[in-house]
Amino acid sequence: MMEFYFELPLWLRLTVQGLAVIAVLFPLAGACSMAERKVSAWIQGRPGPSRAIVPWLAWIPGISLLQKLGVFHFTADGGKMFLKEDVAPGSVNKFYYYLAPLIAVVPALCTVTFVPFGAYWDAATETMKPLVLANVDVSMLAVFAVASLGVYSLILAGWASNSKYPFLGGVRASAQLISYELSMTLSVLPVFLWVNAPGGEGSLSLIHVVNTQAQPGLWGGMWYVFLMPLSAFIFLVALFAETNRQPFDMPESEADLVGGFHTEYGELKWGLFFVAEYAHMFVGSAIFMILFCGGWHPFPWLPLDTLLGWLGGIAPIFLNPVVSGVIAVGIFLAKLIFSIFVFMWVRWTLPRFRYDQVMKLGWQKLLPLSIGNLIFYAVAIAIIERS
Amino acid sequence: MSFKTVERRPLSLAERTYVPQILSGMKTTFKKMVKPKETLNYPEARPPIPPGYRGVPTLVKDPNGREKCVSCQLCEFVCPPKAIRITPGEIPPDAETAHVEKAPEEFEIDMLRCIYCGLCQEVCPEEAIWLQNVFSVSGYTREEMVNDKKRLYELGGTLPDDHYKWDKKKAAEEAGNPHH
């Protein structure tokens, strides 16, 4: 099986790898919509969607747990969205109207290419080898570059809908995403200043960032969320704004804009916007976990290598490349799911900011704060490394 | 007029960052999340009905199985939306309860008209019509929403009787006191 896989031509292997990652991310992003409904229900003291079940599966013992979790509601909703009639309002600009959801999904799923999502134990070199679709040295930059393309979809959707509410939503989206991108980018710079020691080769690689959080010693094993809490905080706030989540969901605020940029959208096109939003959330949380929370390492000061070393002492199966890879991806996914849960938790806790408050917070608070943060860490790192 | 000036302190630095407020809000919602759910799983779980609840009007029988209604038509007369329609009938002389003389031949309550006011129950001299605890009525046609006599007895069932008024009257008659 493995030999067969490695004998395939490279382009086919890469396609299979890419499809495998998308095959995980796409349903996960869809399942998030269900999770959103469940979390909102639990916070509001409701059981949430819990009735639907496929009649000919009802005999399976334990399936009522899936029913309670609303899994069949999710599949029914998804199926409905695929089977609905494709309607476009007469007033829209057809070409851009159909283009916008595609532009939303494609960059959202493309960013995954650059995000490392695990590592496996390589017995030959006795080290952890990262699992990533494209192991490039500029992965951080690439993620920012591709993810920021997503704003075009919102602008296009708002403009092509040829209606006032979507237009306002699109305008808001572009203003908000551009203003928070600045502080987001500035907040990750201290991490890379710290990671790239002078004399060594400079790198913007996310894998490198994860590895530097798993070094021996008090400082080496520390996650950057402890070392640079302000950076992490600014990044998180900007992430909420970038993914259009409450309290920053200006582009689609139902109360004043009906549905914002997707007011005129329905069926699968609307669904694609949501898959894109949740995919953005996944990638954004992945970047946050990689930069500040040690990626696939289970605990601060306890890297996965050490843990696998212990487990390998008990049972050598844990040093199998597949098993160790599954463990690493599992830990990383657990962190991601927790972070998605926090996104939802915050959404059902906080009210929405007013639009001027969003702008004020972005430009007058967060941006100076991130610049100050950058200067502070630049000076501090210069002093530490000089001594 | 006396009034109190509320002191408005300027926000502290911690309050201006929103962070402690956001965290305390998240604490509140998390507590709500782990608490038992408030929602009733309705069709399976039913809410408790308090005593004295006025649900769908029904006809009842006494513990001996005698239908209590004597078709005096007082409820028909008092019903504000005219939901009740009674066709009076005679009890055949060979029946065991022949001394009651009258019983409804047909008794219809139109649930599309009924306003659940309970006046029929209040006016009934025989305690034959009761508003009980059925609160959910549905149907596909207007005809389905009219409860006929059979359906009314199905809904009503049997209620305890404190008086056995007609049994006493019969007993008194047999004891030679026809004016009881």
Image (cartoon, grey):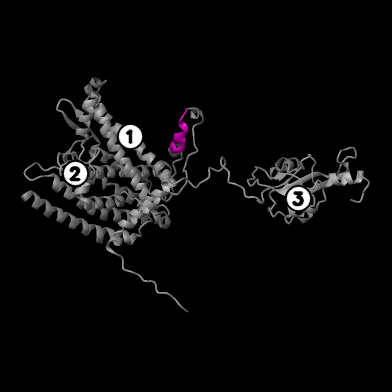
Badge 2: chain ID: A
Kindly indicate the quadrant of the structure image that contains residue A272: top left
What residue sits right under mark 3 in the picture? B84
Write down the region rendered in magenta: A61-75
| Crowd around label 1: few <14 · some 14–19 · many ≥20 (10 Å) | few
Residue furthest to the bottom in view is B1
Badge 1: chain ID: A
What residue sits right under mark 2 in the picture? A222
Is A90 one of the magenta-colored residues?
no
Can I make out residue A103 in this image?
no
Q: Amino acid at mark 3?
A: Ile
Comparing A323 with B60, the one in front is B60
Question: In the structure shown, which secondary structural element does the residue marked by tag 1 occupy?
Answer: helix
Q: Amino acid at mark 2?
A: Met
| Residue B14 left/right relative to A139 | right
Q: In the rendered image of this protein, does residue A309 appear above or below residue B52?
A: above
Kindly indicate the quadrant of the structure image that contains residue B155: top right
Question: In the structure shown, which secondary structural element does the residue marked by tag 3 occupy?
Answer: strand
| Crowd around label 3: few <14 · some 14–19 · many ≥20 (10 Å) | many
Q: Are marks 1 and 3 in contact (CB under 8 Å)?
A: no
Whole-number angstrom distance, CA of label 2 to CA of label 1: 30 Å
Same chain shared by disc 2 and disc 1: yes
Comparing B78 with B40, the one in front is B40
What residue sits right under mark 1 in the picture? A24
Is A64 one of the magenta-colored residues?
yes
x and y percent of residue A115 in the render? 24, 39
Camera-near label (2 vs 1) is: 2
Q: Amino acid at mark 1?
A: Val
Can I make out residue A365 in this image?
yes
